[in-house]
Amino acid sequence: MPYRFAVLVLTNGRTIFSGKRKDMIPYFESLDYPCPAQKNPADYYIDLVSLDMTTPEAHVESVQRIEHLASIFTQHQPSLTDLSHPGVLPPKIWTASAPWQVIVLWIRALIFQFPYNLIEALHQVIQNVAMSVLIGVVYFGLNRNQASADDRLGLLYVILAVGIWPMIIHIIQKEYRAKKWLHKDLLDRTYGRGAFLIAKLLCSLPVTLISIGAYIIPVYFMTRLRQDDDFRSFGIFVGMMYLHVFAWRATAKLLVYMLPTPGWTVLPLSILAVLSSQTSGYPVHPNQIWRVFKWFEWISPTQWTFQQLTQQEFNGIDKFNCQKIPVQVGGLPILTSPNCGVETGRDLLSFMNLSRHATLPQDLWMGFVAVGVYDVGMFFLAFLAFFIIRQRPRLTPST
C-alpha cells in the first residue's frame, strides 16, 4: 500500500514490508527479488505478494513465497519489551494554578499577539473618534437658546442610541472570532474559565476605557455640551456615558455567550435597542407610549442616561434666549411681542416629561444608580452564561 513518504505492503493480514519508500526496492533486492527493468516497482511487488490462482502448483508456490517473505520481515523487527515487568510510570502532568494561568494568558495576549493587538486597538480608537467627530460636525456649535433646545435633545439621543453601535458590533465580531479557539482550549483544559475571564478583563480594560473616551470626549466639546462655571457637567456626562456604553457591552456579551451565531445575537439585541431607545423619552413622548411597553423604561439604560443628561443640560437654564416676533392684535394697528413658549430649562423638561424620576436635587443621581445596577446585573449574567453554556462555535463551510 503506497503512501507519500512511507510504504506498507500487506497480504492476507501479514506484513511483508513497512518502511520508507526509498528503502523498499533495496530491501527486496537484498532478498533476491529485484525489480525488472522497464517495470513499475509498485505493480511488480504487489504481484509478488499476491496469491496466484492460475494453477494448483502456482498457488502453492505463491503461498510459500508469501510465508517466506513475511517470516523474514518478522525476524528483522526488534523484539518487544517483556510486559510482565512493570516499567516506570510517566510523570504526573502538573496543572498550573489559577494565578499562573492568568499571568500566562496575559503574556500571550500582550506579547505573543503583538503587533496585531496594537493594530486592533488603534482600529477601535480611530473608529470611535471618527463616529464622534461625525456627530460633532452635524451638531457643531449649538447655541443654548430656545430654537436649539430640540436639537440638543436630538444630539443627546443620537449619542446614546445611534453612535455607540459600531462599538457594539465590533465587540460581537471579536467575541465570535475568539470562540473558534476558545472552545478547543477549554475542552483540552489548557486553562480555566475563571482564569480566562480575569486575564481578558485585565488585558481589554485599558483599551476599552481609551476607546470609549475617544467616542465621548470629542463630541462633547464640539457641540458645546458643557457649562462655563466648572467641570461638574463634564464629569457627569463622562460618567454616565461610560456606564451606558458598558451596559450595552454587557448585554451584547451575554447574548454572545448564550447564542451560537452572530445572526442570532443581533436579532434580540436589536429588539432590546429599539425598545430602549423608543422609551427613552425623545422619539415618543412618555405620555404617548403604549402601556404594553411602558414598563420597559424602568430597565432601559438609554432612558435613565438620557434623563440624567437632559437634567444636567437644561436644569441650569433659568431663561431661554428666544426671538420675539411682533404680531398684530385683532386687526388693530397695535404690535405686541408675545412671551416664549418655553422660557426655562425646567419648563422644557416638564413639557417633555423628562423630570418624572427626579423631583428632588438628590434624585438626579438616580441615573447613576439605575444604570450601575443594570451594568452589574448584566455582567453577572454574562459571566454565569460563560461558565454554564459550552462556548462552541457554529461550524461553517469556511471553517
Image (spheres, grey):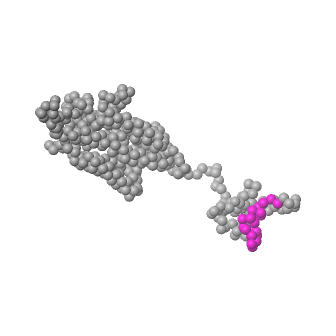
Q: Residue at x 33, y 53 (%)?
A: 126
Q: In this view, does 208 lie to the left or right of 10?
A: left
Q: Position of residue 167 (x, y in %)?
A: 36, 46
In this orientation, which residue lies closer to the viewer: 213 or 6? 213
Toward the bottom, the furthest residue is: 37
In this orientation, which residue lies closer to the viewer: 20 or 208? 208
Q: Which residue is drawn at 34% across and 54% down?
A: 122
Q: With respect to residue 77, does 247 lie above or below?
A: above
Q: Is residue 132 left or right of residue 38?
A: left
Q: Residue at x 12, y 33 (%)?
A: 333
Q: Position of residue 197 (x, y in %)?
A: 39, 44
Residue 278 in sight from this viewpoint? yes
Q: Which residue is drawn at 30% across and 31% down?
A: 285
Toward the top, the furthest residue is: 291
Q: What stretch is highlighted in magenta?
A: 31-52
How would you classify the magenta stretch by its main secondary structure?
Answer: loop
In this orientation, which residue lies closer to the viewer: 348 or 177? 348
Q: Does the magenta stretch include residue 13?
A: no
Q: Position of residue 362 (x, y in %)?
A: 20, 31
Q: Is residue 47 magenta?
A: yes
Q: In this view, does 383 lie to the left or right of 213?
A: right
Toward the left, the furthest residue is: 334
- Tell me the quarter of the image containing the N terminus: bottom right
In this orientation, which residue lies closer to the viewer: 103 or 387? 387
Residue 68 in sight from this viewpoint? no
Q: In the figure, residue 157 lies in which quadrant? A: top left
